[in-house]
Amino acid sequence: MFNFKFEKRKLIVLSLVFVLISISYLNYMINKQSSLQTSSEFQKYEEDQMSQMNNEDSFKDTVTHQGSDDGEATTSSITTVEDENNIVDSSKNGLDDIITVSNTSIEDSMATNNFSKSNFFLQAKIDIEIEREKTIERFDEIINNNKIDEESRKGAVNKKLKVIDVINKEKIIESLIKSKGYEDTVVFITDERVYVTVQIDELTQPDIAKILDIVTSETKYSIDNIKIQNK
């Protein structure tokens, strides 16, 4: 009788285990199917967006200007990209202007950031991330414009990779500085300077030395081009 009960309980346990495994498998398949569907929809969305982008006349028009002598209209080989009220071309200077405008916008937003300590860092990071994304999108628009010459396209690719590299450096430096015991930090890198803001009541010489060591090691910027402040 005892053996019968034992075998019966064993059978019930095995049955429950089988049911749980079956339910887990079904959930896995459902989630996998849902994930695949979402991925497919997102890919289709990206393709639609890219198609719309390539069809936008504002990124494909060439510059038409008045000739100086005969008064006839001539057409430039430089493709233009509109940036709100500014026209930025795809030449080297035009590509540099995209980054310059973005960096200026970040500098202005950080200078006017009057939030409390914790919110300052959050807002600063959001502002930087938004501007970086906008800059990358601008270069993508140039890269994907079928009227752009190959030299300009390569220039836009190089500038985009440079921005991505800067983003990575900023994140690495922020992580390294926080690992030294600071509550929070935000790092902003331009062609000329590195701006570092750390969350600490008082910035001592040892603090400055530790931060400078990290920044110079990661960016190769000279000490004179590194600006450190506390919040």
Image (tube, rainbow, N blue to C red):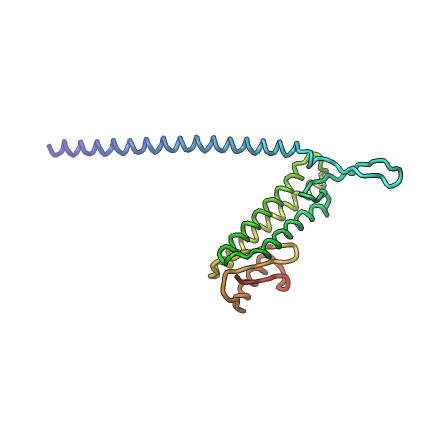
Residue located 53% across and 52% down the image: 123
Q: Is residue 222 above or below residue 11?
A: below
Which is nearer the eye, 103 or 105?
105
> Would you identify the image quadrant in which residue 227 lies?
bottom right
> Would you identify the image quadrant in which residue 23 lies?
top left
Q: Is residue 224 above or below residue 59?
A: below
Left or right, residue 177 beside residue 99? left
Residue located 58% across and 31% down the image: 48
Q: Could you tell me residue 65's position as x and y percent?
A: 80, 39
Residue furthest out toward the left: 1
Which is nearer the eye, 123 or 142?
123
Which is nearer the eye, 142 or 52?
52
Which is nearer the eye, 30 or 134?
134
Residue located 16% across and 34% down the image: 6
Residue furthest out toward the bottom: 205
Q: Could you tell me residue 220's position as x and y percent?
A: 61, 59
Residue located 47% across and 30% down the image: 37
Q: Which corner quadrant holds the N terminus?
A: top left
* Number of numbered callouts drawn: 0
